[in-house]
Image: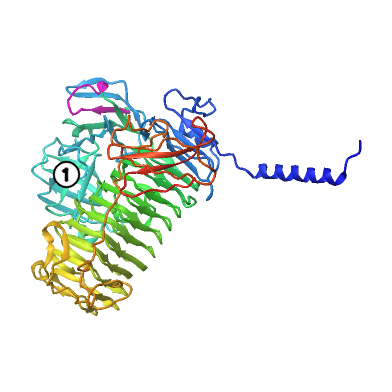
Amino acid sequence: MLHDSSTSTAARSRLFLFIETLERRVLLSTYYVAATGGSDANPGTLAAPFASIQQAANVAQPGDTVLIHGGTYRETVHPLNSGTAAAPITFAPFGDGPVTLDGADPVAGWSKYSGSIYSAPLPWTLGEGSDQVFLDGQMMTEAQWPNTSLDPLHHTTATADSISATINPTGLSTATIHSSALTDPAGSWVGGIIRISPGQAWIWQSGTIISNSPGALTYTYQQLTSYEVPTAGNHFYLTGKFQGLDSPDEWYRDPTSNALYLWTPAGDSPASHNVEAKHRLYGFDLSGDSYINLQGLQFFACTVNTDANSTHDNLLGLGAKYVSQQLIEAMPWDIKYAPHTTGIILNGSFDIVDSCTITYSSGDGVFLGGSNNIVRNSVISEVDYGGGDEAGVSIQGSDNQVVQNTIYDVARSGVTQFFSAGVKIFYNTIHDFAIQDSDCGGIYTWETDGQGSRWAYNKVYNGLAGGFGATGVFLDGDCNNFRVDHNIVYNVNTALKMNYAQANDRLFNNTFVGVNWGLNGGTPVMTNVLLANNLFTGSMFWGTGAIQYHNLAASTGRIQYVSPSTGDFGLMPGSPAIDAGIVEPPYTDGYSGGAPDLGALEAGMQPFVTGAPIPAGIVKTTSAKSFNVLTNPGTRAPAPAPFSNNSLATNAMVGPSAGSGTLRAFLDSLSGDTNSFLILSSTSGWNTFVV
């Protein structure tokens, strides 16, 4: 039989085109992980899940999703592959309970040692000052003198009656502390660690004890600045020796026998509790990985790490507690010259931390070492409890953004910026800082050319310290090219401090209310530094050469704020600050009345809002298959409905009792694979999700 060659060619052409279309399709997969009932020998399906997240991370390809059943996962996950801009790899909870990456492992084999002290083998260590022991989810205190509480940010300390120091400018210095409170036997603390806030108490550092006797103790240390020579009145405490284990809540690990000794809060056997010891630094290590989404996961005793090759990674709705522990710092100031190793670590570019809760870190809450990264809408607290030169957010890379966060309970500074350009610090609430240190800031920089960096629309308050005090906005030591506008600062020792040589800074429309100083500085020389439309309360010390106009320095009563005692620094009708400013585009754009007002808030206009607008608590996800009115009172959700390949239009409200939810799209049916999903957090607005 003869065939028409043209017809056959057309058919073959059509077939070829059809096959080509199929070959261009990307098959997206969903892998499942279950801590209970899973096996890494399984295929990772819903019916046969993997046991470890790492196994799913080994096989996940661009566009794939890994859904993790509720449970605790003691592992460091390092994805084998990166995603792409169009097809990121996503790790998220399945929706049946919290998913926790745990950096600690259980400690077992307890036996009574003496009295209320029990012991168990602990063969691993992360090094002196980096180990942690947890009982039922709470960090215990490494044995120390004097005894303290379980709050690491508010240490109980001893005070030196006198100190004599022998300074060696090229090596170790030696100091001898005299204190009547020192009563332990001679030699009992030799080899232990002293942690002291020396001299002007700007920072905490570590030293090594070389002798002790009742009433005296000698240690070696690295001398810091001339302002920090150990002196009478300095606070200190001792750790690192079994001698300190003499009260509940304390532990000690013997480095020779690898034995852990623990006195529980109730004095009972640790065997009746969940006792864990830190064993891993990271829950996820995204070094070299890009386009990875981590959504709604919990991190305990570990953090997330990236490197310079990590780009476009998104950390969304994470809860991180006890993220880092590093307490031995002989030269704590040096950390500004090197990448930090504490907190959520972003050393890459275009990475995002969004809607996260980060609490308890001996150092940073978040470290931005790379460029073009964003930290936003997150709550960061109880950080830098080691008292070093870290912060709620530390910035060392250029063009980073810290936006709309709430940062509080910090030992030193809220946000720091070192040697980085083009940084934006906007709309943050920063309060209760300088809890351990002094000469620090709510927002702080040092010897940095900001190259247009802008700090704007922040609220900074409750920073009070001894000595040099605490400052709301602090440009320390030769800073240039910063833009500081529309910040509200109050209940701090000094509202604005500008030290030494400053050049080309612009400070417009700020409200600076200091307890002692509205403006101060150490021998400031200001070249082409403009200050206009600012309100100051407190003593004033203008730097040499400052160009200042249309500023008002007066008491809060004369300025006539609405309610300064409750933090409302809006202007009352009749305030002398209304219409008293000068136009300074773009900082005064949109003003009302005949001229801009002085200060951060324009009278008659809605005040700006600072801090995390969405409560950044533990994010939970809920499968649409089980999310309904009956099991979730006070909420309503749409019934499952088919949709086209173009869009799904639906309204969903998640009530306060649920906190959050998940909208998921399934292929073919509710029993099909998950095609995509969106985590919904509590909000007063609407969300639109296009599949």
Q: Which secondary structure lies at badge 1?
A: strand
Is 368 located above or below residue 273 in the figure? Answer: below
Q: Is residue 73 above or below residue 356?
A: above
Picture layout, residue 416 above or below residue 633: below
Looking at the image, which is closer to me, 575 or 207? 575
Q: What is the three-letter code of the residue carrying label 1?
A: Leu
Q: Quadrant of residue 135?
A: top left
Residue 419 in picture, x, y percent from top left: 37, 63
Give the colouring mode of the picture: rainbow
The residue positioned 37% from the left and 62% from the top of the image is: 423
Q: How many marks?
A: 1
Q: Quadrant of the N terminus?
A: top right
Q: Which residue is mark 1?
A: 217
Q: Identify whether 176 is placed above or below 505.
A: above
Q: Position of residue 213 (x, y in %)?
A: 14, 40
Residue lying furthest right: 1
**Observer-nearest of 48 and 310:** 48
* Structural crowding at the residue carrying mark 1, measured as other residues with C-alpha within 10 Å and reported as few (<14), some (14–19) or many (≥20): many
| Percent x, y of residue 255 | 31, 32
Q: Is residue 300 left or right of residue 75?
A: left
Residue 97 visible within the image = yes
Residue segment shown in magenta = 258-272
Front-most of 145 and 361?
361
Q: Residue at x 9, y 71 (%)?
A: 558
Could you tell whether 105 is left or right of 182 in the image? Answer: right
Magenta residue check for 648 = no
Q: Position of residue 650 (x, y in %)?
A: 42, 43
Residue 395 image-quadrant placement: bottom left
Camera sees residue 342? no
